[in-house]
Image: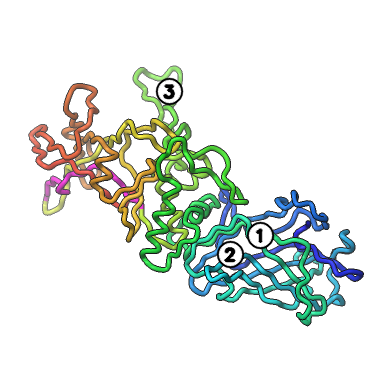
Amino acid sequence: MYPGYGYWPGQWNFAIEAISFSNAIEIRDNAGIVFSEPQFKPVSKFNLYGNPTLIDEHWDYPLAFSAKTGNTVKVKVIFSPLMWGVGANGEADAASLPFSVQGHGPVVNSNGKTLEFPPELVTVQTMTDGKKYYVYEAESKPVDSFETNKVQFFQSFDINWEYDKDGQQEDWPHLLEAPTRHTVYVVSDDPVGSPCRYQTAYYLACNKANGLLGANPAGKAAIVEKIFDAFAAPVFPGRVKCVDYKGNEYGNAFAYWGPFSFPPPIPPPAGSPPGTPPTYPHNDDWFIASGLIKNQDGRCGAWSQLNQHAIQLNGIDATISSIAGKRADGVKTTTTVDGQTVIRDEWRSNTLFAKATAPGQNNAAPNFRFADHAVVKAAGTTNQYFDPSYGNKYLTFLALQTSEFDGFTWFVTRWVNDVFSGSPDGFIPGPGTPPAENPFPIGTVLPGAAGVIYDTPIKLESTDDHR
């Protein structure tokens, strides 16, 4: 049946024109376009007389709400008049008043409470198209709203609307012909930071963590751990996909260092001088969560950001940590002139080598050489590091570096007045025979080079300033 079709025998009938939820929090489609009000607008105003296959036609924009303390839901339902299932003049008639409307949603609280919109008298209002409509406006009470700090995901959030003809609110229930159906994401608290608000990110924030309470540090830690289940190994074939406005996964599984984020170099144009190097493409989408969702492909920064943003949508802070090689003692060699530092030599990691045999998300053999690597950290969790690119989580940093990395190659760089001026000692080759990029194992003490003694071991470090 047509959702929101009401009929009073022998008198008049009406249908839902649109529904707005004014205090829903921002949610976007997978191209970044905001789902704006009204969030529900049926395809047709006409009575469809019991064809259940048409219910999807009335499944409109997804909704997102915060389960912060004292949360409520504000609703505005616009009704248009009908005459025997056929559009009349499109105008509401004040002579038909008074009548009242109320709404009943599904169970949203562990004590069995349902989302309730209280009975209110309908008014006649002129909308932006210049026509008059019947309008019901109401706000749920906190006790009848989403359970505080509880993560929830409703793929079929049905609201039954009832009306009373004379406005005395004594003839309930007169149900509209069918409920309105919505897809609803409820996050534990107001989002923090600036997370990507695409519907796929909300799905990752709520689907696995559905039913968990983030009211205290232990609860928040449990949400973080459960969110990671969507990224956890096995990662090949991949399992993370885009999600549509109905809460259904679709398309290809997202890839780590796939063909989009790791394209081949572009050869120099014909006729270029000998030795002209190729051009290496660059695309910012390779490194950000929205780019990963749009292209189903990204590098470690994008994967870590997607994991981080799913956590932040629940009001839980999380950081992205950069894994790179540093000099173990952090000392920089400096030269001073007139009391000012003008030259400094410092260690620079040239290439970080992951284990070549480790599969990544939807990629059995991803690129394993890169300048640094990104992982996620969240306070209070048992596991200190979450690596969505490879689907692993670790109790300690030592466990992470031992499991995922083989070693490094190195440069020593010289800076004058904070301006790069070259590499005086250049590339420091690893042990063994060429190729020279054969890496030093983690913990190696470097030999002297060009009169400079490198007496500290290579150290793998984690910082929260991922480039």
Q: Reading the chain from its start, which is encountered first: label 1 or label 2? A: 2
> Splitting the image into 4 quarters, where does residue 265 fall?
top left
Depth order, front residue of 254/285? 254
Q: Name which residue lies at 34% across and 34% down.
A: 358
Q: How many marks?
A: 3
Q: Is residue 143 left or right of residue 405?
A: right
Q: Name which residue lies at 89% across and 63% down.
A: 83
> What x and y, as percent, mark residue 331?
14, 48
Depth order, front residue of 423/22? 22
Characterize the local packing of mark 1: few (<14), some (14-19) or many (20 or more) Cα atoms within 10 angstroms: some
> What x and y, as percent, mark residue 108?
57, 66
- Does 246 sit above or below residue 175? above
Q: Reading the chain from its start, which is encountered first: label 2 or label 3? A: 2
Quarter of the figure that contains the N terminus: bottom right
Q: Amino acid at mark 3?
A: Pro
Q: In this rendering, does residue 423 appear at all? A: yes
Extreme bottom residue here?
A: 168
Label at residue 39: 1
Q: Amino acid at mark 2?
A: Ala
Q: Name which residue lies at 69% across and 73% down.
A: 137
Q: In this rendering, does residue 467 appear at all? A: no
Q: Please give the residue where the numbered disc 3 appears in the rendered image.
A: 267
Characterize the local packing of mark 2: few (<14), some (14-19) or many (20 or more) Cα atoms within 10 angstroms: many
Q: Please give the residue where the numbered disc 2 appears in the rendered image.
A: 24
Element type at marker 1? Answer: loop
> What x and y, as percent, mark residue 269?
45, 21
Element type at marker 3? Answer: loop
- Does 426 sit above or below residue 465? above
Disc 1 to disc 3, how far (Cα)? 49 Å
Q: Name which residue lies at 30% across and 36% down.
A: 354
Q: Which residues are magenta?
A: 320-337
Q: Reading the chain from its start, which is encountered first: label 1 or label 3? A: 1
